[in-house]
Image: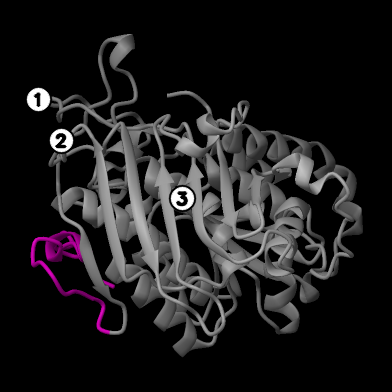
Amino acid sequence: MRMNRRHFLMSAAAGAAGMTLRADEKKKAPPSERLRVGVIGVGGQGQFSWSQLHAIKEAEVVALCDVHEQMAAKARETFPHASFDADFRKLLDRKGLDAVVVATPDHTHAVATVAALKSGLHVYCEKPLTHDVFEARTVAETAKKMKRVTQMGTQIHAGDNYRRVVELVQSGAIGTVGEVHAWVPTTYGGGDRPKGSEPVLPGLNWDLWLGTAPERPFFHGARPEQRGVYLPFNWRKWWDFGGGALADMACHYVDLPFWALKLRHPTRIHAEGSPKPHPETAAFSTIVKYDFPARGDLPAVNLTWYDGGKQPAYLKEHGITGWNAGVLFVGSKGALLADYGRRKLLPEKDFANFKALEPFIANSVGHHREWVEACRNGGTTTCNFDYSGALTEAVLLGVVSYRCGEALEWDAAKLKVTNTTAADAFLRREYRKGWSL
């Protein structure tokens, strides 16, 4: 799998944070004033999160959890006084915690998050918030009931460029927007489950890693070209654990139109992909069309998602190159093209004399710091579970439509597809015995 730009940027940021941590340690707030945090899943994206938290003087990482001891080595070295557990349920039983970060594979997000919320803890969970649609609604409702501070890890939401794009859309710079496109080159998918089994990797608790997912033999790949069938990253292509490129990346890119256009729940979702739906693995590419209803004075919106190298025809029609990933807003007075760090008003000749707006959305103090400060001082966050729960629901409905092979008519109030029962099996999955929300 190619490392996409998001993972590169996040890895670089984690590395930069790591280089400054020891220099900042003397500036740490007194222990009594720090947010005491546990991190569930400390390798990969979890390392990015604990690196960021370690740089915040008001936060202290006091508990670590990972089902793979080797993946936990760096974190345990960085936090030698933190407790360590392989099972997140034991971490949640520990006294003195204020909050947790959930950075596991997708299929464990909901059970860990709901358990933490019910334990009275604030929660930061990586995206997508959950593995299925029912879980997303349950997590959002549980957070509201427990009145905890929450944040989903769509870190780019804190970037300055996203704020400036939202300002342009909401100020009417391109007129009324009723059409949006979002795309990425990312692809995970294809293949059948390997036959047979292999010895579990040293230090890995395979049963805990499977968690809620159906039992299956461990397989890593004896030959070099087979390595990483499931771990450390290819789990994203297997339906039991992830949701392909759509579940991985759409929460980042669809986040921008969700914010700018105040979207909430789609009413119709139609996904197509290549190859045709497979019972085990995701598609190499998908195109998902979402219909969102009018919101107050805002008109209905048609949003189309593309992954695996697919892109909107608009780019080719207008000779636009160099945008392998991005978001395109099409308005009545023009268009706006954006990605994580760029934005461009189109046609450029029509906006040659456009005067830059005076910013009206305050810059973020940082995605993790925003959460830490809200936990300590009250208040809310920009990607709290009410907002990110609805975003995740919409994204995952695209997965449901692709897997069942039908367009969906969605009743968000009843959490129900009204035109077909074929979707029911994919809206809510059955957990393995011993696991529940």
Identify the image quadrant of residue 188: top left
430 within the magenta span: yes
Label 1 sits on a secondary structure element that is: loop
Which residues lie in the magenta part?
414-437
> Would you place residue 291 above or below residue 252 in this image?
below
Near mark 3 (Cα within 10 A), the count class, few <14, some 14-19 or many ≥20, is: many
For the point 83% across and 70% down, the residue is: 360
Residue 193 locus on image (x, y percent): 15, 30
Point out the image quarter for the C terminus. Answer: bottom left
List the residue tagged with mark 3.
250
Q: Earlier in the sequence, mark 3 or mark 1?
A: 1
Give the side of residue 172 with respect to residue 234, left or right: right
* Amino acid found under the numbered disc labelled 2: Pro
Identify residue for label 2: 217
In the rendered image, which quarter contains the N terminus?
A: top left
- Mark 1–mark 2 contact, CB under 8 Å? yes
For marks 2 and 3, the one nearer the N-term is 2
The secondary structure type at the circle numbered 3 is: helix
| Amino acid type of the residue tagged 1 in the rendering | Gly
Q: Regarding mark 2 in the picture, which secondary structure is present there?
A: loop
Residue at 30% x, 33% y is 230
Q: Foreground residue, 377 or 32?
A: 377
Say the numbered circle drawn on residue 196: 1
Give the left or right position of residue 412, taking residue 18 as reference. left
